[in-house]
Image (cartoon, rainbow, N blue to C red):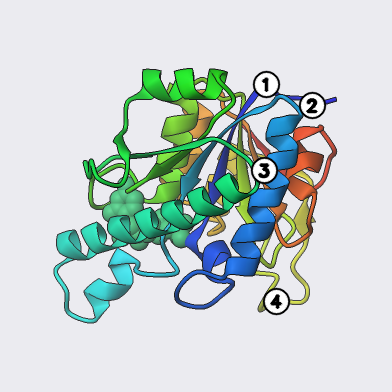
C-alpha cells in the first residue's frame, strides 16, 4: 500500500548517463519500467531531471565559459534527458508531459504549475526540465521548489552508487557511515555534498521531507513509496 499520494522524484544527470556523457538507454529504460509500476499503483509522479551528464555550469566556467551562459547550457542539457525519459516512459505505457522553465514550444509545454497538477490528477507523469530557468541554481533546489509548489508529500532523491546519506563520500572513503535519518539542520551543519544546501534549507523552511535512496537497485522507487525504510530520511 503506497505511503504517498503524490511524489516528486529528482533524477540527477549522472543517473541518465550511467556515469558517462550522454544517455544510457538501459538505465533510462529500467527507470521507466519502475515508474510504470508506481503510476499503476495509483501514485502521482512528477520528476525533476538534472543535466550533469551533459554540462555543469561550474565546470564549464573553469574552462573559460562565462558562468551565466554555461548555466544555460546546463539547463538545456536537462531537456535532452527529459525527452529521453519521456520516450522510455511512453514505451512503458505511461502518459507523460514535459514542462520546461525555458520556453521551447516545439518540444515541451511551458512550466505551468496548475496545469502540471491537472496532468498528475489524470495519471500522467510530469517531467520538469530546464531547471528553474535561472543561472546560479541547481536542479536539487528546483526539485524542492517544484515539490512544494505542486503539493508533493515527499521529495525522493534517487542516487547512483550510494544507498543514502553518509558522513563522508562512500565512494572514496571506506569508513564512511550511513545515516538512516538526520535533520536538515544537521545535514547543513555537516556541509554534506550529496544535495545542494539551498535545496535542503528550502525543504527545512517549508516542512518537506527528503528521502535519499539508491536507484541502482530495481524496484527501489516503489519500495520507498511503500514506506520501506531504505535509504536516508532528511527531515525538516
Ligand atoms: N542549472 C541552472 N539553473 C537551474 C538548474 C540547473 O543554471 O535552475 C544548470 C547548472 O549549470 C547546473 C546544470 O544546469 O550545473 C545541470 O544541473 P545540475 O548540476 O543540478 O544537474 P545534476 O547534478 O542533478 O545532474
How far apart are the alpha carbons under marks 3 and 4? 32 Å
Name the residue carrying label 2.
2
Q: Which mark is residue 173?
A: 4
Q: Do the residues labelled 2 and 1 touch (CB within 8 Å)?
A: yes
Name the residue carrying label 1.
5
How far apart are the alpha carbons under marks 2 and 4? 35 Å
User: Is the C-beta of the residue carrying label 1 under 8 Å from the nearest atom of ligand 1?
Assistant: no
Residue found 77% across the figure and 40% down from its top? 222
Residue found 21% across the figure and 41% down from its top? 103
In the image, 207: left or right of 40?
A: left
- Ranked by sequence position, the earlier of labels 3 and 4 is 3
User: Is the C-beta of the residue carrying label 4 under 8 Å from the nearest atom of ligand 1?
Assistant: no
Height in image: 87 above or below 160? above
Name the residue carrying label 3.
35
**Residue 231, visible in the rendered structure:** no
Judge by depth and name the residue closer to the eye, 6 or 95: 95
Judged by depth in the image, the label closer to the viewer, 4 or 1, is 1
- Ranked by sequence position, the earlier of labels 1 and 3 is 1
Crowding around mark 1 (Cα neighbors within 10 Å: few <14, some 14 to 19, many 20+) is: some
Residue placed furthest toward the bottom: 63
In the image, 32: left or right of 223?
A: left
- Ranked by sequence position, the earlier of labels 4 and 1 is 1
Amino acid at each position: 500500500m503506497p505511503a504517498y499520494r503524490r511524489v516528486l522524484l529528482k533524477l540527477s544527470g549522472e543517473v541518465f548517463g550511467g556515469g558517462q556523457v550522454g544517455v544510457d538507454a538501459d538505465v533510462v529504460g529500467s527507470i521507466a519500467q519502475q515508474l510504470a509500476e508506481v503510476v499503476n499503483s495509483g501514485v502521482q509522479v512528477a520528476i525533476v531531471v538534472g543535466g550533469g551528464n551533459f554540462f555543469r555550469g561550474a565546470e564549464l566556467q573553469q574552462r573559460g565559459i562565462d558562468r551565466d551562459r554555461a548555466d544555460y547550457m546546463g539547463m538545456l542539457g536537462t531537456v535532452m534527458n527529459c525527452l529521453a525519459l519521456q520516450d522510455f516512459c511512453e514505451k512503458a505505457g505511461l502518459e507523460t508531459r514535459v514542462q520546461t522553465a525555458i520556453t521551447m514550444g516545439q518540444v515541451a509545454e511551458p512550466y505551468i504549475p496548475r496545469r502540471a497538477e491537472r496532468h498528475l490528477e489524470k495519471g500522467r507523469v510530469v517531467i520538469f526540465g530546464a531547471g528553474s530557468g535561472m543561472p546560479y541554481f541547481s536542479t536539487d533546489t528546483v526539485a524542492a521548489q517544484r515539490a512544494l509548489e505542486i503539493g508533493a508529500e515527499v521529495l525522493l532523491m534517487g542516487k547512483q552508487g550510494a544507498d543514502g546519506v553518509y558522513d563522508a563520500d562512500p565512494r572514496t572513503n571506506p569508513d564512511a557511515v550511513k545515516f538512516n535519518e538526520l535533520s536538515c539542520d544537521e545535514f547543513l551543519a555537516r556541509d554534506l555534498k550529496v544535495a545542494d544546501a539551498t535545496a535542503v534549507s528550502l525543504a527545512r523552511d517549508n516542512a518537506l521531507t527528503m528521502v535519499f535512496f539508491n536507484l541502482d537497485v530495481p524496484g527501489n522507487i516503489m519500495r520507498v513509496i511503500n514506506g520501506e525504510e531504505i535509504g536516508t530520511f532528511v527531515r525538516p
